[in-house]
Amino acid sequence: MRFKMLMRAGAVAVPLMLGTTMLATVLAAQSGATSLAGTLPGTWQGEQTMQRGGQATTLQSTYVFKAAGGTITGVAVTTRSRSEIVNGQVDGDQVTFGLRDPFSNSASAQPYRGTYAHGTLTIARVANPNAAARRGAGSKAAGRGRGAFAMPPLELHKVSADTVYQLPADLAHAPLPPVRPLAPNGLALTPPMGWNSWNHFKAKVDDHAIRQTADLLVSTGMRDAGYIYVNIDDTWEGTRDAQGNIQSNSKFPDMKALADYVHSKGLKLGIYSSPGPKTCAGYAGSYQHEAQDARTYAAWGIDYLKYDWCSARIVYGPDEMEAAYEKMALALRATGRPIVFSLCQYGDLDVWKWGAEVGGNLWRTTGDIQDNYASMARNGFSQNAHAPYAGPGHWNDPDMLEIGNGGMTDAEYRTHMSLWSILAAPLLAGNDLSQMTPADLAILTNREVIAVDQDKLGKQGSQVSHHGDLEVWTKPLAGGALAVGLFNRGPQAAAMTVRWTDLGLKSNPKVRDLWAHRNIEAPGSYTVQVPSHGVVMLRAE
């Protein structure tokens, strides 16, 4: 909630909007006449300025504390996020509690401590000495946003005794309709293939970059290998006109003309938005404008929408996520234009179990990928349990490809491409196509590996054996064939052996190495040296 502040010498700032009762509550708290245990329940507000990449960002925060049976619970909401307050305890002038992501089934609570003095509750995160070790030296935390903030202490002041969080009036919404399972839309019968702007261009994407990428998808042969979608990620959005219609910003002067150009190349154009009021980069989202935005996308000629949760977490609760996504799915369908619908909410709340029912053609199952082996392996090798939920028209998405961005070796990029193909994952390149090396292009356009990803049977592969750093994954293919990936996740090259009958094949199948592009005679079993962080990928039948 936004509010102006009344200041006087030596006093804590008090919101001008407070009524007499609320003001009395605040002044009583400031007087120190009550203990923190009696003062804490209620609504507290403040703001903090954080640094990221040399830039300052100010976030407004609202904490709503309630007490029950000696335990403090509640909710903490900022202009970027919503967290549950859990396991709180008051001891004198201090309160300790945890903040937990309510959208994640597996999130643990981050500990915080608050100290109360002279009407101000100062909140600081309690450092976890094991966090850096878990992330690994030099790595970024696995996450869902666009980078980490340096978090200073937050000073809160009590504004009311209300222990139920209320959305600000300008963000309030009517209850969402109950979710009803939707029939398939008939799109994405194989995993979508294409290119996305974020991994390389981020906020620098513009009309010229998209046109150049479309040209290069054709001239490099990537289009003919299956890379059809040219997807504009965040930062294309402008303001809304007087009627509420979303406009593209100055980087994209004519989105309809751009779509026409992309279509003229035999390609399709994708775009990005959020169910929240703001996108992850702070641009206009589709909140309260879902049908209007869908009609605009259709009029422009858009073929694919990536819909990123982002600030939706501040206006919707966990029990509303499915309905928020279905609202846009219905809006897209109402336009009559076939638009692939990509849910981007980082695997929260087991999306693979309900993504298809709310109209999704694909859904993210992980946090954002980074261009390094650890991040790629974390996203890709964690997909085993999700296999039953993938199929024609509805795919698990461990995030975009990093091939060609320079952070991994060729062997690691071959692992990336092989694993994503065995997973029947969307293949969305994210590199600067004008700077591709011949090796990058060869990895991205390996028709035999792509054929595994695009196989019409539509089965996601899974792990069948795991011995230390050595893993074997298989994927059933149409016609009874089997794709086999021998992955070495260790620091040294290693010999790997696969016995065909262990995989349910006959003892002397036809075998082809999909990276070496050669047939193999290997009756009974096959032993091969696999490089560190590398793969040998086979087709056997």
Image: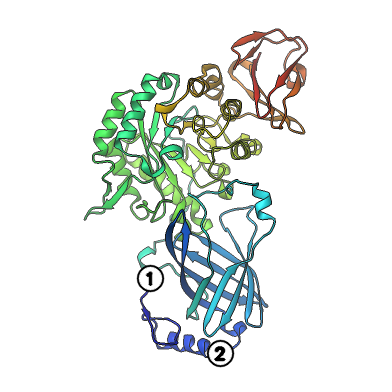
User: Where is residue 333, by image quadrant?
Assistant: top left
Is residue 96 positioned above or below 375 on the image?
below
- The residue at 47%/36% (across/down) is 361
- The residue at 49%/59% (across/down) is 81
Disc 1: CA contacts within 10 A as few (<14), some (14-19) or many (>=20) = few
Residue 483 seen in render: no
- Of the two numbered discs 2 and 1 in the rendering, the one whose residue sits closer to the viewer: 2
Using residue 388 as the reference point, say whether residue 490 is left or right of it: right
- The residue at 37%/74% (across/down) is 3
- The residue at 55%/17% (across/down) is 448
Q: Could you say where residue 312 lies in the image, as x and y percent from the top left?
A: 45, 55
Q: Could you say where residue 384 lies in the image, as x and y percent from the top left?
A: 66, 36
Q: Earlier in the sequence, mark 2 or mark 1?
A: 1
Using residue 266 as the reference point, say whether residue 342 is left or right of it: right
- Dot label at residue 32: 2
Q: How many marks?
A: 2
User: Where is residue 466, by image quadrant?
Assistant: top right
Residue 26 seen in render: yes
Is residue 425 positioned above or below 198 on the image?
above
Using residue 339 as the reference point, say whether residue 84 is left or right of it: right
User: Where is residue 93, by image quadrant?
Assistant: bottom right
Toward the front, the furthest residue is 54
Q: Considering depth in this image, is 404 or 66 the residue closer to the camera? A: 404
Q: Considering depth in this image, is 434 or 325 the residue closer to the camera? A: 434
Q: Secondary structure at mark 1?
A: loop
Q: Considering depth in this image, is 198 or 329 the residue closer to the camera? A: 198
The residue identified by callout 1 is 2
Q: How far apart, in angstroms, are the residues tagged by discs 2 and 1?
A: 26 Å
* Callout 2 amino acid: Gly
* Callout 1 amino acid: Arg
Quarter of the image that includes the C terminus: top right
